[in-house]
């Protein structure tokens, strides 16, 4: 039998979905499973986006330009300018989700064997994108005790080698919900400028910042216009995860010219999804005001509930809709699987994502799990109660 590639062997399994078979079996056995493992919001998609699909009158679903429909890029440019991110349509390439945007970015800026530095824990699929591009992820570990604040600059400096090509961040963060301040981003700016690196910033959760916190975009960092590559997506902003539309943005013309060649190789981003995404830009501000208000309530239910359970610690996130909690257990992955296989409370149990899969450093996050507070408030209260009762009887509690 022919042998698989090294990339196939090295491609990591998703910590978000790896326990799905156990959840499916639990549901088949009649349990209610509260899915806190994945960032799939139950918030309704804006009506303007749904109507754009329903009322589509095209006779042919044709390819778009490889960079995406010009009308959509023009409208996106207007949106970004409205939030003080001044980019032109020519500085935007529409991609099949933010995932493809980051993949294009890696392929454009790095060669196999190069290194990218990423503060951990980080969105687990970054590992997969790096493997696909033949890159090595070099982690800088953030601590749950500091709420996952940016690690000291010295820790980044220690890891920079002749192979280092980029630093990658997510802001607000997945899986932690941490929001980097302007001051923290300026520290990264100084490192990037000093070592002439690229800075990738995944800002897909920009609209979801809480308690008066305001996001600061890397596109507004002074002095590194040619180094910055912004990754964005409609998935979470408009609760359109199944509409696979994202974008890659840079003022570096060489980067954009090269990235477009990768876009041409896959012909075009999805036509119907672009139609919905373009329409979604007409979503009224009241939609976001209501969504943010709801997420704050959900966050507070989850964080307060978790921290009231003896032995559990969970920092309060300032953005996105995730948190990472530390549990008094021998192994969080084992605990997550046990919840699905061997536990129920009033006919229900909870599915979480073991946090060790969001770290690149072996042994990190062994007692932590990521929780997505994307369910309604009642379900979140019941989820917390399930976890409280589970910890009373879990055999591996410490």
Image: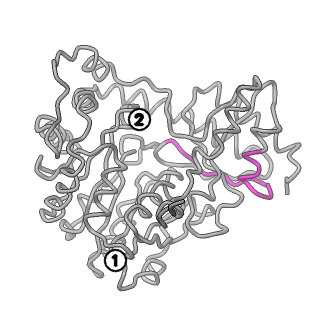
Which of label 1 and label 2 is nearer to you?
Answer: 2
Q: Quadrant of residue 102?
A: bottom left
Q: Quadrant of the N terminus?
A: bottom right
Q: What residue did someone put label 1 on? A: 191
Q: Residues within 10 Å of mark 1 (few under 14, many from 20)?
A: some
The CA distance from mark 1 to mark 2 is 34 Å
Q: Quadrant of residue 38?
A: top right
The reply, left or right, for residue 105 in relation to residue 344 is: left
The label shown at residue 241 is 2
Q: Position of residue 374 (x, y in %)?
A: 54, 34
Which of 232/5 is in front?
5
Q: Earlier in the sequence, mark 1 or mark 2?
A: 1
Does 240 sit above or below residue 314? Answer: above
Q: Residue at x 38, y 25 (%)?
A: 45
Q: Residue at x 45, y 42 (%)?
A: 210
Which of 367/264 is in front?
264
Q: Residue at x 35, y 65 (%)?
A: 185
Q: Quadrant of residue 300?
A: top right
| Span highlighted in magenta in the image | 321-337
Is label 2 in a helix, a strand or a loop?
loop
The reply, left or right, for residue 73 in relation to residue 241 is: left
- Number of residue marks: 2
């Amino acid at each position: 039998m022919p042998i698989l590639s090294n990339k196939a062997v090295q491609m990591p399994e998703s910590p978000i979905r790896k326990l799905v078979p156990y959840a499916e079996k639990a549901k088949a056995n009649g349990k209610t499973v509260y899915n806190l493992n994945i960032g799939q919001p139950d918030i309704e998609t804006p009506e303007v986006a749904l109507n754009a699909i329903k009322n589509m009158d095209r006779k042919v679903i044709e390819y778009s330009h490889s960079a995406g429909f010009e009308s959509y890029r023009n409208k996106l440019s207007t949106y970004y300018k409205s939030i003080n991110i001044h980019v032109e349509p020519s500085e935007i390439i529409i991609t099949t989700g933010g995932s493809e945007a980051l993949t294009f970015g890696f392929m454009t800026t790095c060669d196999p064997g190069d290194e990218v530095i990423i503060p951990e824990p980080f969105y687990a699929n970054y590992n997969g994108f790096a493997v696909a591009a033949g890159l090595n992820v070099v982690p800088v570990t953030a601590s749950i005790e500091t709420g996952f604040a940016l690690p000291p600059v010295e820790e980044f400096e220690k890891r920079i080698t002749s192979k280092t090509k980029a630093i990658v961040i997510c802001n607000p963060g997945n899986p932690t919900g941490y929001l980097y301040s302007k001051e923290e981003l300026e520290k990264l700016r100084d490192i990037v400028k000093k070592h002439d690196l690229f800075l990738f910033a995944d800002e897909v959760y920009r609209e979801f910042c809480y308690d008066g916190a305001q996001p600061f975009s890397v596109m507004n960092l002074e002095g590194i216009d040619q180094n910055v590559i912004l990754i964005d997506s409609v998935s979470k902003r408009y609760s359109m995860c199944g509409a696979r539309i994202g974008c890659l943005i840079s003022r570096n013309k060489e980067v954009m010219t090269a990235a477009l060649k990768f876009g041409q190789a896959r012909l075009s981003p999805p036509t119907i999804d672009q139609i919905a995404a373009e329409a979604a830009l007409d979503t009224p501000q009241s939609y976001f005001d209501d969504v943010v208000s709801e997420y704050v309530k959900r966050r507070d239910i989850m964080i307060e509930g978790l921290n009231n359970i003896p032995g559990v610690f969970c920092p309060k996130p300032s953005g996105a809709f995730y948190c990472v909690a530390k549990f008094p257990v021998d192994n969080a992955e084992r605990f997550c699987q046990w919840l699905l296989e061997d536990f129920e409370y009033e006919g229900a149990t909870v599915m979480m994502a073991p946090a060790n899969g969001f770290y690149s450093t072996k042994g990190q996050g062994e007692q932590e799990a990521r929780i997505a507070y994307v369910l309604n408030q009642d379900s979140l209260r019941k989820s917390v109660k399930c976890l409280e009762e589970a910890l009373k009887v879990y055999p591996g509690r410490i």
